[in-house]
Amino acid sequence: MIFTVVIALFICLMLIVGIYAKRRTGLGADEYYLAGRRIGGLVSWATYFSTTYSAFMLVGLVGYSYMFGVGALGFELIYLMGLMLAVFFGPYFYAVSRVRNCLTPSQILSDRYESRVVGFTAALIYLVFLIPYMSVQLIGPAIIFDRLSNHALPFEIGVLIMATTTLIYTFIGGMRGVAWTDLIQGLIFLFSALTLLIYVFSMAGGLNAFSILESKYPELLSVPGGMGRFTFTYFLNLTIPWFFFCLSNPQVVQRFFIPKSPRAMGRMIKGFVAVGFIYTIIVVLVGLVARVFIESSMVKPRLEPDYITPTILELSPPALAILLMVSIMAASISTLDSILLTLSSIVSIDIVGGKYNPVFIGRLSMTILTIMVTVFALTRPGVIVELSVASSAGLLSIVPSLIAAIKWGRGSGIASLLSIAAGGLTSALTQILKLSLYGFGAGPLTLLVSTATFIIASLLTKPLAKSKNYIREIENYVKLHFSST
């Protein structure tokens, strides 16, 4: 009963914030999708943080740390290392959103390469490859609901609750609603993760837990780790998509468009690096110490990464279990709402072409996307960590074109189109047919094929006459507005 009441209260809070945000949102696509590009530093940080960290962390990464050891920490720290790309390229994305009035990452490609076909192709890649990652945000909480309610809220109902809640307040509030709820949700899952770590440590014997880990489970403290999982090639297959996450995922790139000033964007990135590092350490420690906690309790969990966190919660006091359940729900919704909003803007701008009311088209596509993701999630397609990486592997096909759009005047529209298509096809075939080359899978191969295709095709084709002026215009804006930040 309490479990259901807490879920209902949390949903009501999110809907209230969404409704209030709608009242503060003006007319037009810029207001609905980017909150008028007037989001302050704190809220910009919160929506960047909450968009990035999802059910992947408290469900997926905890399970990976529990079963396979410290390789999971290295895997996630590679993502934080990739934020050097955000530090370098973030100002350029901010600039192009102002100078060229771009609303979506794929619109940058259409604008720079003077080809709607390029933007359209990138949009299709975003839509196809983000479906698995969106489904993760429904699967993680639904597993928790099922276990904590003793099957009173089965997996299927949990998926529907998550999908419906996210759709309603994103539909209503747009970017402002998403950003404000992200602030609330980000604080919730930071606090709950720290609380869980303290509890698991106390139940595992405090700092003595490290000695127990070292003596009983030494394989977790070295590489390749438990079950020999983190081999060199496996590690690279996971980490290469993660390193480029801030450039490949459109919901993250779009976050560079919304800060109200260069100073606010600087605070967003600095805050994310600091808090993201702390949160990563907390989550991995929970997984490692939980190995001592769970096995000392004589409970035998289902040995799949996604079922470790539900087992921890079943062994926790009811109040803590409910807090963690709300936290996982918050983390998942905050990522799903951002992706939904970004993809709906991509459909209305880059696929439909902005010919009709872009907010109406966006809301319609948002509804259709939610239905598709719900159906996909109900099939239980795979493990959360691997689904997340599979999505990012496919999105790597866009990275070379996006970088060249703002930094390399030699790049051509034909090269971009060929690169995106070749990379996307490589990722799809590699994953569907389970192919590899010397152990390297979809991520490395996609990046290699798309980069090589882009460079070779650019050198064989004529660059656009305006490309150097385009890049110079963006660079001048960055020098003028970011020199002091």
Image (cartoon, rainbow, N blue to C red):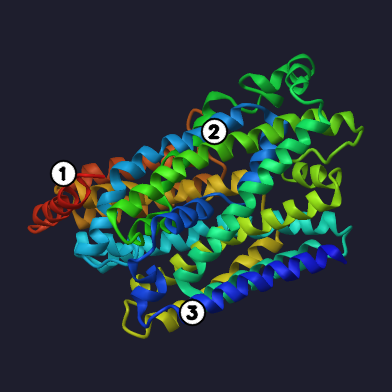
Residue 441 point in image, percent of width and height: 50, 37
Residue kind at label 3, given as amino acid type: Lys
- Does residue 139 sit above or below 66 in this rendering? below
Residue hosting label 2? 75
**Disc marking residue 459:** 1
Q: Which residue is drawn at 34% across and 54% down?
A: 264
Q: Picture coordinates of residue 149 (x, y %)?
A: 86, 59
Q: How many marks?
A: 3
Q: Which of marks 1 and 3 is nearer the N terminus?
A: 3
CB-based contact (under 8 Å), mark 1 and mark 3: no
The kind of residue on which mark 1 rests is Leu
Residue 173 picture location, percent across and down? 50, 75
Looking at the rendered structure, the secondary structure element under dot 1 is helix
The answer to whether one can see residue 380 in this image is: no
Q: Which amino acid does label 2 sit on?
A: Phe
Decide if residue 379 is on the left or right side of residue 413. Answer: right
Depth check: 33 or 426 in front? 33
Q: Give the CA separation, mark 2 to mark 3.
A: 39 Å
Q: Judge whether 391 appears above or below 283 on screen.
A: below
In the picture of the structure, the residue carrying the numbered disc 3 is: 22
Q: Nearest the camera: 452 or 43?
A: 43
Q: Image quadrant of residue 343?
A: bottom left
Could you tell me residue 18's position as x and y percent?
Answer: 55, 74
Q: Determine the CA span between mark 1 and mark 2.
A: 35 Å
